Amino acid sequence: MLPSTTTMTTRSFIVSASLLLASAAGGAQQSPATFHQLGHAILRELIETNTTGSSGNTSVAAEQLATRFRDAGFPEADVQVVGPSTKNRNLIVRYRGNGGHKPMLLLAHLDVVEANKEDWTYDPFHLTEHDGYFYGRGTQDQKGGAATLVTTLLRLKEEHVVPDRDLILALTAGEEGGMPYNGVEWLIKNKRNLIDAEYAINVDAGGGEMENGKHTLFDVQAAEKVYHSVSLTVKNPGGHSSLPRKDNAIYALAKALGRLSAFDFPAKPNDVVKAYFSKAASAASPAIAADMRNVANGTADAASIARLSQTPLYNALMRTTCVATMLEGGHAPNALPQTATATVNCRMLPGEDAGAVEKVLTRVISDTAVHLVPIDTAAPSPASPLRPDVFSAVEASVKAIWGPVPVVPIMETGATDGLYLRNAGVPVYGFNGLFIPIDDVRAHGKDERILITSFDQALDFTYDLLKRITR
């Protein structure tokens, strides 16, 4: 659902007026309540602009936000909406600093995955406030993070803050797929000068973990797995269902998938994962903490690995995983299947070779009737160095907002646009200020939501961090 032109014009006027009044007053510091109110308005604007790959348009969202930045006094040359497609453009904003250091890139994506209104309790493309939550597609992934960046840069501009480097905001298209191009990949290939930076902060990863209402950990993504999918296909002549055969294509595929489900790739925790377990141990129960420390120290035995592997996150952090995600077979209810196919999605550890993983799958399946074919080509994503300046600033800002919450490096078990930047030589650190309960992760799912208090605190954190890290 797209906001009306009248509504958008009114919102832009209100924001412009508030910024002009602040400028006239000499750039006095904005109150937290006003800051939060602006953040809520920007989040609403983003959620209520459909940016799905099928029927949405990231260019509309980019232009709306560009208007906000221009009205706030950003020069026309520093606010650009660029891209090869009229429906899927990217917004690039440069906040000028004093040039003391190379720029820092702030990255978020504008597009979201599909959402069927019929499946949701609330309209996914309307920001709904209920019982202390904001509901809407993209609240977690990841218009909530994008809104914190936009709101903070507008506040810094209003207060005439001059950072020690340029801050480059890139709000991009195509991260979720379903669009003709990926925004970050296109920018690197065609407009590298607009986003070239010493390092990047990507709000599409990391962030806060909550458990039973308590802020337990703050994750900073420094590495990510590699996405790679294969298809498994079984074919045979088929026939009439009244004359069953033992070489049924569906049965053969099911047996292959059963073998795959019982198999685990070996645990190979890398340095980022070891660092995660070392710090996460302080927030874990004594038994789990002991296993975490064993992994961190390189002294974990099979029993420690097995216990940690019972938790899906810890299992995915330690090893390459491959799991069946789609299934198709047969062509008629009264015919033996001639074809049965499964899609298997693998998330490979950094440095793993796709061909080697495929050979392991072939060995595990152990059936020449099952044909494995790669669906995509994996793009390696090297880990980013654990920069002390970045982590010390994050730790200080986390402490300022939430107290002594451990800040831990983590490897993303999925994949983000950070891989394009890392492959281009730009280190990426993934985190945002949103704390999400570990049992309420609804990204890509029904009734996606975030706590309103969490969003407000994320605004405060982002503001504190950007001021602190660019002194």
Image (spheres, rainbow, N blue to C red):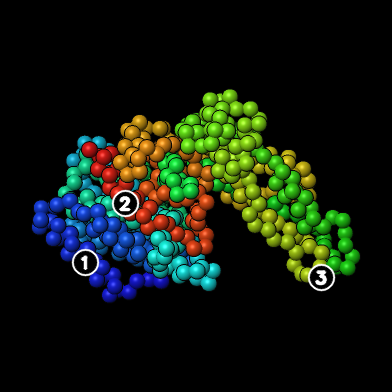
Q: Residue at x 67, y 39 (%)?
A: 264
What SS does tag 1 mark? Answer: helix
Discs 3, 2 touching: Cβ within 8 Å? no
Return the x and y of residue 78 as percentages of the image width and height: 23, 53
Residue at label 1?
14
Distance from label 3 to label 2 (Cα)? 59 Å
Q: Earlier in the sequence, mark 1 or mark 2?
A: 1
* 1 vs 2, front mark: 2
Q: Relative to 309, say whether 388 is above or below.
A: above
Return the x and y of residue 438 as percentages of the image width and height: 50, 49
Instruction: Depth check: give the residue in front, 353 or 470.
Output: 470
The residue under label 2 is which amino acid type? Answer: Leu
The residue under label 1 is which amino acid type? Answer: Ile
Q: Tell which residue pokes out farthest to the right in this image.
A: 243
Residue at label 3?
334
Q: Residues within 10 Å of mark 2 (few under 14, many from 20)?
A: many
Q: Relative to 75, say whether 125 is above or below.
A: below
Return the x and y of residue 458 as percentages of the image width and height: 34, 50
Q: Earlier in the sequence, mark 3 or mark 2?
A: 3
Left or right: 428 as drawn, with respect to 169? right
Q: Residue at x 33, y 54 (%)?
A: 456
